[in-house]
Image: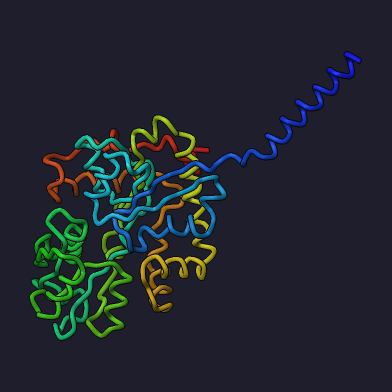
Amino acid sequence: MRVLSVTRCAAIICGAVLCLAVARPASAADKLNVGKAFPTSFAFIPINVGVEAGVMAKYDLDVTIIGFEGAAKLQQGITAGDVDIGLGSGTDMAFVKKGAPEKAVAAMAGPPLAYGVFAGAGTGINTVQDLKGKKIAVASRNSLVYWLTRHLSDNLGWGLDGIEEVYVSGGMAANLAMLQTHQVDGLTVGIDVSYTLEKQGKGKLLGNYGKYVKLFVTHVIFASDAMMEKRPEVLRRFLRAWFATIDFMHENKEATMKIDMAADNITDPEIASKTYDEVLPMFTRDGHFDRAALEVVRKATVELELLPTEPDMAPLYTEAFLSPAPNSR
């Protein structure tokens, strides 16, 4: 009888444990806050694709996307602890030098294929060769578009000051107002914006900056110090998911276009298609940094007055969370 009671008790306990196991939810996906330096740009669309196409979920990641209006605000989000992973410009590595609690953990994009130079209607500018001495609107003295405009001029043989940069704040509305009142001759803007303006009859896309500035680290992925120190395996998994997303984008144009159109407020499939074809090749496939391209970034941080002297780049980035480069396996 005593044995029966013990057996019965054991059965009850086992049954209770089994019920708890069944009732317990599957292990929750790891939550991540991922910030984009700009909310609408094909340069940052892979994170939207990764979430919407289910790639991030496949890697057991629950990602919240946060769009910021500029690099400085993204950096504030990382510093405040609101952002785990940030998608920004290569020159934003200057913030690491200044003490921001982060490092660049992957090279996201090489040549600046997401940016174009656009000439306004009625300016008589038909090719990049017509830009000498012309006025091009850029965001600020410290902006990537300022640097690109200067180096387009240099690449065309006119030196860094062969094109006049005009600082215009206030976003696209202010840029268009300056263009339409002929206070500037052109803009340095996203390729998708250029295609849209061209279709609206407001001018002409003259060229893609990536065809002239071929050695650069246009965008990088940053991780907060807390992310690297406390959740290194989650960070590694995120980077694997990111590059799996890039593979997905290469293999699924229509799905990528659909997500881009929804995220970046593009209504014309032709513009989405042309942007995809033009910009997709800039994304790196493994995240490893090109040392020669880093040298260009190093010099750019001083040219943009982000730093007083050229920094040692080694402390500003790490490849420790990436899969080994193909030639190192």
Residue 262 spot, x, y in % from top left: 42, 68
Q: Residue at x 31, y 77 (%)?
A: 196
Q: Front-most of 8 and 294?
A: 8
Q: Nearer the viewer, residue 258 or 325?
A: 258
Instruction: Looking at the picture, tell me which residue is in the foreground, 287 or 325.
Output: 287
Q: Is residue 254 above or below residue 232?
A: below
Residue 195: image location, x then y, percent: 31, 76
The single residue placed furthest to the top in the displayed view is 2
Count of labels in the image: 0
Q: Can residue 183 be seen?
A: yes
Residue 276 x %, y %: 42, 68
Q: Is residue 292 left or right of residue 177?
A: right
Q: Is residue 43 above or below residue 1?
A: below
Q: Residue at x 18, y 79 (%)?
A: 120
Q: Is residue 327 visible?
A: no
User: At x 18% / y 63%, what residue is drawn?
Assistant: 149
* Quadrant of res 283: bottom left
Residue 319 image point, x, y percent: 40, 38
The image quadrant of residue 104 is: top left
